[in-house]
Amino acid sequence: MVVRISTGQSIRGVLGYNESKRVEGNAKLIGYQGFFPGVENLGIVQLVRRFDALLSLNRRTKTNTVHISLNFAPGEKLSEESLEEIITDYLKRIGFGKQPCLIYQHHDAGHPHVHLVTVNIDAHGKRIETHNMGKNLSEPARKEIEKQYGLVPAEKQQFVGPDIRSLGKLSYAEIPTKAGIQTVLNQVWQNYSFCSFGEYNAILRCYGVEADRGEPDSNRYKRGGLVYQVLDSAGTKKGVPIKASSFYLKPTLKKLGLKFQREQSRRENQVPVVRQKIIGELERSNSLQELEGRLKKQGIDLGISRTATGAVFGLVYVDHQLQVAIKGSDLGKELGATGISKKFGLVHAKDQQAGAEDRVGGQKNASHIPFTTKELEGELLESALEGLDLGKLSDSAYQGPVYRDKKKKKKRQKTSNQTES
């Protein structure tokens, strides 16, 4: 059983997410504690009021919402009664046995999982400590519950959610688009390592999804927007684009930029291992198509970007065993677009701009987003800068125009001259 705990400041937001899943038919309210019978018939306003009754007792605590997901191994079939028993036991062990709580079972992923919604203010207005709760309380509780109920230990679950082979590509119109994309995003963000927009999209394409910033001259691109769409078997976008901010995960450009930075530290150990795998198959291949086939048998997908004339200008290797995507040029010149093109006698884009190696599906390299001059200057969407601490940006991150107050400058000069005289 894998446990994920998150805390926040909006009980309405967490309830809204789970209730929207229930309305869509992708979740079911299977249990509750601290509510009267018939809670399944209440609206979100009435549900919020129940929690607000406790939150009103302690307005000083801002981080007052607790959202927990319990994820079980694929194949573990648990009845609603069994889930309720496990959850009741878990809540008691972490000190939330007397807190009002709603239990939602979600059906939008390839593994059984439930979401618990509660608050950390008790009936006396005291705050229930959540700092290090995962390490000090949840982990011991999880291990005891796994033994007691015969669950697959978290250590034996290599990921949360289906792997690339069991999930496969999304098929447009067969499942709800948003729910399908959300499942893919959860899988990719929780399990894969990527350090650029191109690498990120290469992974998503394996699942039949693409992140789209829009064309460089479009309003979406200029304002830092991002949408997601399902792809058909030919790689063509289908359906209505869905904004990144509308997903619970909120996989926006700002959040991507932060993830790129965090993943850089893992790259040093991954590059040599992936490179060794590919070099061996490259030496035995006589064509790009043969190389693709050999790599696929090793659990590696090759993302190829081509110009309108068919010239190869970008390669990204997605290793599903190591769960990492790395662009070709980072693995060595011979594994980049130019090196591969020369080896197999392919046309390569000689006049491509610097950094085009990292473009996938026409997307520009965005490993730096949204911390660039273009994104920070001019008109920006609030979503692109929401929560961004500009004070933490380095001097090199922003080199836009500096505006000085001429009056203050003249005043300083006048004062300086008077002092000297």
Image: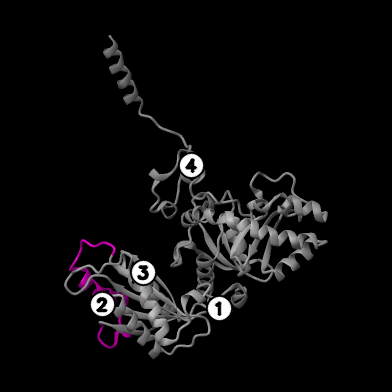
Chain-order first, disc 1 or disc 2: 2
Report the residue at 63% width, 64% height from top.
319
| Range drawn in magenta | 35-63
- Residue 59 shown in magenta: yes
In-front residue for pair 7/320: 320
Q: What residue is shown with label 3?
A: 134
Relative placement, left or right, of 338 versus 11 is right
Badge 2, how many Cα within 10 Å: few under 14, some, many 20+? Answer: many
Looking at the rendered structure, the number of numbered marks drawn on it comes to 4
Residue 408 percent location from the top left of the image: 32, 25
- Residue 289 shown in magenta: no
- Amino acid type, residue under disc 3 in the picture: Gly
Chain-order first, disc 3 or disc 4: 3
The quarter of the displayed image where residue 273 is located = bottom right
Chain-order first, disc 2 or disc 4: 2
Q: Nearer the viewer, mark 1 or mark 2?
A: 2
Helix, strand or loop at disc 1? Answer: loop
Estimate the spatial distance between the alpha carbons at disc 3 and disc 2, rounded to whole Å: 18 Å
Q: What residue is shown with label 2?
A: 99
Residue 233 percent location from the top left of the image: 67, 71
Helix, strand or loop at disc 4? Answer: helix
Tell me the number on the disc at residue 175. Answer: 1
Estimate the spatial distance between the alpha carbons at disc 2 and disc 4, rounded to whole Å: 46 Å
- Amino acid type, residue under disc 1 in the picture: Ile
